[in-house]
Amino acid sequence: MHTDPRITERRNPRTADIDLASPLEIVDLISAEDRTVADAVATQREPIAKALAMAEQTLRTGGRVFYVGAGTSGRLGVLDASEVPPTFGAAPELVQGIIAGGMAALTRAQENAEDRPDGARDDLDQAGVRRDDFVIGIAASGTTPYVRAALEHAKKLDAHTAIIACSPPPAETLAAADIAIVAITGPEVVTGSTRMKAGTATKMILNMISTGAMIRLGKTYGNLMVDLQATNNKLRDRSVRIVAEVCMITREEARTLLFEAGGKVKIAIVMNKLGLSAVDATQALVAAGNVIRKVVRNAPPPAR
């Protein structure tokens, strides 16, 4: 039998009889495969760190980060990008997801969209990708034509590029990527179903890149989210809890402080720690690159 060169398309001998398995046996088989994913991702710690640093640099210098993919890979990119604004208070345009077939492909497969290189070029142009942006292609198999074309087009625009894959990409794709993150997750439980192990690995990698970049940009104080957008009751309550904990004040005092800070957790913390007005606290933060630690050097958050 011919062996597909794409590792993600090969048959997994450990699950060859999964169609005869009981529900509990299916769960155990999938769990055993999933346990290997974190180790596969860990082998890519250095290129992931490079991508994280590039994302930080890009955002610091006025550029944007774009995830580009088809199918599951594209959906994961759009998911990660969509979660950055509410989690870190970042503008939606800073991290964007581009999926082959457009946003309709989020809920319904768009036939042959991943095989259209022209679609990738058009999508990047429509998004306004330019010099010094950072385009991260996501392709579980490493061979998606849409992703390869997107990276090649991004290079022509003098944008920074990276590829995230779970099977070794071909030479032409690697040539278009400044950074290659290749986490070999092996054959899937169900042959070719890359929404499983490859999808899990991709989600982990995207989490590291976006979360790490936001941390480096001062979006946390210690490990607390201090730039979140309090758009619902849960997040408003979290804002109060963070201010109360960090400043060691009552919840009622925290609410009052947040009101004076215009609902901004970071400003409230600096106001409390340094006894500043909201205006002065804002100016101090801006001067320190919006990193609380650089403003409040001698008052770290309490250890937990």
Image (spheres, grey):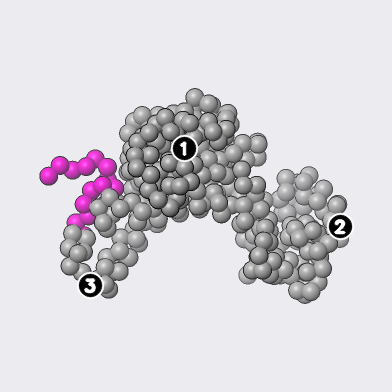
For marks 3 and 1, give the one nearer the viewer: 3
- Amino acid carrying mark 2 in the image: Leu
Query: From mark 3 to mark 1, how far is it between C-alphas?
Result: 41 Å
Q: Which of marks 1 and 2 is nearer the N terminus?
A: 1
Disc 2, SS? loop
**Label 1: which residue?**
162
To which quarter of the image does residue 243 belong? bottom right
Q: Earlier in the sequence, mark 2 or mark 3?
A: 3
Residue lying at 58% horizontally and 28% vertically, measured from the top left? 131
Does the residue at mark 2 contact the one at mark 3 (Cβ under 8 Å)?
A: no
Disc 1, SS? strand
* Residue 211 belongs to magenta span: no
Which residue is more in the foreground, 106 or 212?
A: 106
Q: Which quarter of the image is occupied by the C terminus?
A: bottom right
Left or right for 78, reference 262: left
**Label 2: which residue?**
276
For marks 2 and 3, give the one nearer the viewer: 3
Q: Position of residue 43 (x, y in %)?
A: 39, 49
Left or right for 126, reference 2: right
- Amino acid carrying mark 1 in the image: Ala
Instruction: Evaluate whether residue 254 shows in this view.
Output: yes
Residue lying at 81% horizontally and 64% vertically, measured from the top left? 259
* Residue 4 belongs to magenta span: yes
To which quarter of the image does residue 2 belong? top left
**Label 3: which residue?**
22
Q: Where is residue 160 in the image (x, y as percent from the top left)?
A: 52, 33
Disc 3, SS? loop
Name of the residue lying farthest toward the left = 1
The magenta-colored residue range is 1-14
